[in-house]
């Protein structure tokens, strides 16, 4: 790895920097006001979403199962013999594999489709021989990146007659795998929609999302995604890594106060250790490195950081009260790099191609931020993206990394409402458009606030398990949450935090696992996973 001294002299107190920071503050205030207006409208409707939604089927399996049938009343004799039954109601087609049971209230479900041209819903899965063995698969909102990884939308799909015709016709679509059919319909749909209802059931052995790598390859060709497509997670998911069309410049920004800590049994200056491992392992080429140091940082720590970077590092001295957001912003306004890489000093990359992989997602112009899988020192999950449930959680925090956890949620790159900024990347111009990290959140929630601003601007945040880094969290400071930050986050974003578009209203609230709000041993087992830990 080649390091570039791209910023020979940086400062915090000159007029140019102050002016740029003021522009960020102004833009952040604008977006914050827009967010607060939306939150006020949400609150005025007096919707109590903090109270858990009543889970629809808490009764014993035997009591609700009769409301689902194998053959819908309007299916033809030919459809009953076909592997796929296509039910027609009004202008909608419903694709139902033979192994699935469909709700007898299908007409009521279809009423919820509204103006959507493509829809999917939740499901349950059962063992016909043992009715105690059943579980619910709760799906998130529309996630195109995740659909490339596996068919998370399920086996039963709803589409308008017009969309079906454009995708090749009913007979053609009925011959395809579930994954192929979902990709072909969704890639030309204008309004893919998740319906928060239990639409169908299927045998428990068919509960995991279907995977069709050839369908994904064809899909990428059709929508002009130039990518390397391969199987991962022992064939349980598809890995799609886009080929970059150009070589962008990257500026890594690392705030630190020169903290020392034990990492894998050795006492190190965290920032120096992180930089050294980045230099040793990263396969990416030239990169700028900016380290924002507190004024009281010991000279020996600065010397060690300088040596770890081979001397190619720029320093900014920060002499104010702790404000992580401002530290990032001060460095960000002084670089012309195409992308900003935020690096906590208590991180250590695992995947050598981590920067290349993160950059690849920005080939999609609608992606605003990318974050990798973060692990603790013992290999357990530190963060797999955030889940707003209804307060922010690091998804699977402290859990083992298992392939079958929550139907493979940890195997696939996917959209999230937000992700931890500890090791994350965003385009610099978009960072400026979004007002940077809000300096109103000096310690906590600035990453969540930033991602939600991106969403408001029409950009998606992507979590990818195909790039990994250690995060030795809380070794640099004692974690805590200030009440004013909590209050401000709610004031700005209550309408989004309590309705996570990539969550599900029937998840167990105040839980960091993707677990249905159904109190059973099987529900927890399904959430945590049962097969071997992913290495």
Image (spheres, rainbow, N blue to C red):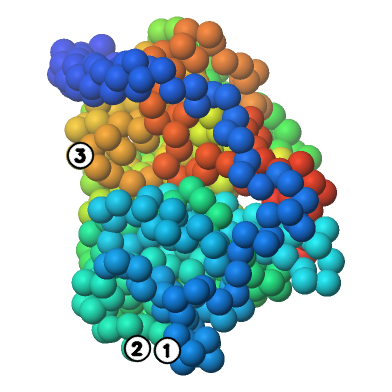
Looking at the image, residue 362 lies above or below residue 75: above
- Which callout, 2 or 1, points to the residue nearer the camera? 2
Q: Position of residue 5 (x, y in %)?
A: 31, 41
Contact, mark 2 vs mark 1 (Cβ under 8 Å) = yes
The residue tagged 3 is 429
Q: Residue at x 60, y 30 (%)?
A: 52
Q: Earlier in the sequence, mark 2 or mark 3?
A: 2
Q: Position of residue 349 (x, y in %)?
A: 55, 50
Q: Name the disc covering residue 28, or none.
A: none
Tag 1's secondary structure? loop
Q: Quadrant of the C terminus?
A: bottom right
Q: Residue at x 42, y 79 (%)?
A: 86
Q: Residue at x 61, y 78 (%)?
A: 99
Looking at the image, residue 315 lies above or below residue 219: above
User: How far apart are labels 3 and 1 at the CA level?
Assistant: 45 Å
Q: Position of residue 315 (x, y in %)?
A: 37, 27
Tag 3's secondary structure? helix
The residue tagged 2 is 171
Label 1 crowd (10 A; few <14 / some 14-19 / many >=20) = few
The residue tagged 1 is 175
Q: Earlier in the sequence, mark 3 or mark 1?
A: 1
Looking at the image, residue 424 lies above or below residue 480: below
Task: Locate residue 18 relative to residue 362 in the image: left or right.
Answer: left
- Which callout, 3 or 1, points to the residue nearer the camera? 1
- Which callout, 2 or 3, points to the residue nearer the camera? 2
């Amino acid at each position: 790895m080649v390091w570039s001294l791209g910023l020979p002299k940086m400062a915090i107190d000159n007029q140019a920097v102050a002016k740029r920071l003021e522009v960020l503050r102004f833009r952040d205030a604008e977006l914050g006001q827009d967010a607060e207006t939306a939150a006020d409208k949400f609150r005025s409707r007096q919707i109590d979403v903090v109270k858990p939604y009543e889970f629809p089927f808490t009764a014993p399996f035997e009591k609700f199962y009769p409301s689902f049938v194998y053959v819908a009343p309007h299916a033809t004799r030919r459809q009953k013999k076909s592997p796929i039954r296509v039910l027609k109601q009004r202008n909608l087609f419903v694709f139902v594999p033979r192994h699935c049971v469909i709700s007898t209230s299908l007409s009521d479900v279809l009423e919820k489709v509204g103006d959507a041209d493509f829809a999917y819903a939740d499901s349950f899965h059962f063992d016909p021989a043992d009715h105690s063995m059943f579980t619910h698969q709760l799906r998130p909102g529309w996630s195109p990146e995740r659909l490339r990884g596996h068919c998370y939308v399920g086996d039963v799909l709803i589409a308008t007659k017009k969309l079906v015709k454009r995708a090749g016709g009913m007979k053609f679509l009925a011959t395809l795998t579930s994954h192929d059919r979902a990709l072909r319909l969704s890639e030309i749909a204008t309004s893919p929609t998740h319906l928060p209802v239990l639409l169908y059931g299927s045998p428990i052995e068919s509960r995991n999302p279907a995977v069709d790598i050839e369908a994904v390859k064809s899909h990428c060709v059709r929508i002009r995604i130039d990518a390397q497509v391969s199987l991962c997670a022992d064939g349980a998911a598809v890995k799609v890594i886009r080929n970059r069309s150009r070589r962008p410049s990257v500026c890594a920004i690392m705030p630190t106060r020169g903290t020392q800590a034990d990492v894998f049994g050795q006492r190190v200056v965290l920032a120096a250790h992180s930089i050294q491992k980045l230099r040793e392992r990263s396969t990416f080429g030239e990169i700028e490195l900016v380290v924002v140091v507190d004024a009281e940082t010991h000279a020996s720590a600065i010397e060690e950081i300088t040596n770890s970077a081979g001397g190619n590092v720029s320093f900014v001295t920060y002499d104010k009260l702790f404000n992580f957001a401002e530290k990032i912003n001060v460095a960000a306004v002084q670089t012309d790099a195409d992308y900003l890489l935020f690096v906590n000093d208590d991180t250590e990359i695992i995947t050598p191609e981590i920067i290349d992989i993160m950059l690849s997602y920005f080939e999609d112009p609608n992606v605003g931020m990318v974050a990798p899988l973060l692990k603790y020192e013992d290999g357990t999950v530190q963060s797999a993206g955030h889940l707003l449930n209804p307060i922010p959680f690091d998804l699977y925090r402290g859990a083992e990394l298992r392939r079958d956890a929550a139907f493979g949620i940890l195997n696939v790159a996917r959209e999230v409402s937000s992700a931890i900024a500890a090791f994350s990347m965003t385009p610099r111009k978009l960072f400026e458009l979004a007002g940077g990290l809000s300096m109103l959140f000096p310690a906590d929630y600035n990453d969540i606030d930033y991602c939600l601003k991106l969403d408001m601007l029409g950009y998606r945040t992507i979590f990818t398990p195909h790039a990994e880094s250690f995060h030795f969290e809380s070794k640099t400071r004692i974690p805590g949450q200030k009440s004013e930050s909590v209050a401000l986050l709610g004031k700005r974003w209550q309408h989004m935090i309590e309705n996570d578009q990539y969550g599900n209203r029937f998840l167990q609230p105040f839980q960091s696992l993707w677990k249905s709000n159904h109190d059973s041993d099987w529900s927890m087992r399904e959430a945590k996973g049962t097969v071997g830990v992913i290495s």
